[in-house]
Amino acid sequence: AQSVTQPDIHITVSEGASLELRCNYSYGATPYLFWYVQSPGQGLQLLLKYFSGDTLVQGIKGFEAEFKRSQSSFNLRKPSVHWSDAAEYFCAVGLRNSGNTPLVFGKGTRLSVIA
Amino acid sequence: DSGVTQTPKHLITATGQRVTLRCSPRSGDLSVYWYQQSLDQGLQFLIQYYNGEERAKGNILERFSAQQFPDLHSELNLSSLELGDSALYFCASSSNRGDETQYFGPGTRLLVL
């Protein structure tokens, strides 16, 4: 069965500092990969996705993620964090070639931003 | 705004009761997914419908059921509610046209007392 691991439950960074959130997946082939963000009391907003092609994908709000097949990883990065980035971040995977499939989510990483 | 709408936003009910959560997918999307988010289980897939038919089933309890109507909106029915059913219930939709991206609604927060 597919699984997604986000090893960091909670991360605190200073405003303006860089950020990297880790995501590893377990699956026999390369799945579709997603990062979503959830602000307190809000729904899930898609940050970015990887289907194929360039392994460095750009998303909204200045985020990017890099797919590394050899490491089964899809880490999320941002060069300079803003206070408004404080939220919960979820990595998710979906099966390929099976026609609209349910997502498997990691447990999430809560990001706190300090001044 | 993802284009997916869910009603109600909040629901408070008692144990043993039955509730219905409603979801309208993005215009043109044929697939609807239901997820449950709880503190202990995280985000878990419940069930998927595609163009009115059940496509996939996840960790959905027998007390829960869903359907998708001809206009493509979906309803999730939760019955014989227990305290442990308190959670945030999300609906998501996707186009089923080569783009597997799921867009999520704002969720329905259910509190069972």
Image (tube, rainbow, N blue to C red):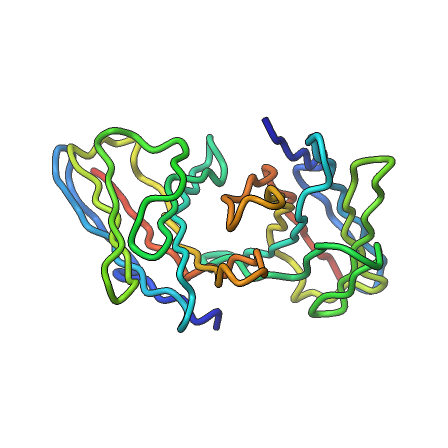
The number of numbered discs placed on residues in the rendered structure image is 0
Front one among B26 and A52: A52
Q: Quadrant of the C terminus of chain B?
A: top left
Which residue is at a point 68% across and 57% down the rendered structure image?
A49
The image quadrant of residue A9 is top right
Relative height, residue A113 to residue A108 (above, below): below
Which residue is at a point 45% across and 57% down the rendered structure image?
A41
Which residue is at a point 61% across and 47% down the rendered structure image?
A90
Horizontal side of B111 relative to A113 (left or right) equals: left
Front one among A77 and A113: A77
From the top left corner, tell me how far across and down residue B108 is, in percent.
33, 54
From the top left corner, tell me how far across and down residue B78 is, in percent.
21, 40
Residue farthest along the top direction in this orientation: A1
Relative height, residue B105 to residue B44 (above, below): below
Front one among A67 and A61: A67
From the top left corner, tell me how far across and down residue A10 is, in percent.
67, 41
Horizontal side of A2 relative to B32 (left or right) equals: right
From the top left corner, tell me how far across and down residue B65 is, in percent.
24, 40
The image quadrant of residue A58 is bottom right
Relative height, residue A47 to residue A73 (above, below): below
Which residue is at a point 52% across and 57% down the rendered structure image?
B102
Front one among B32 and B107: B32
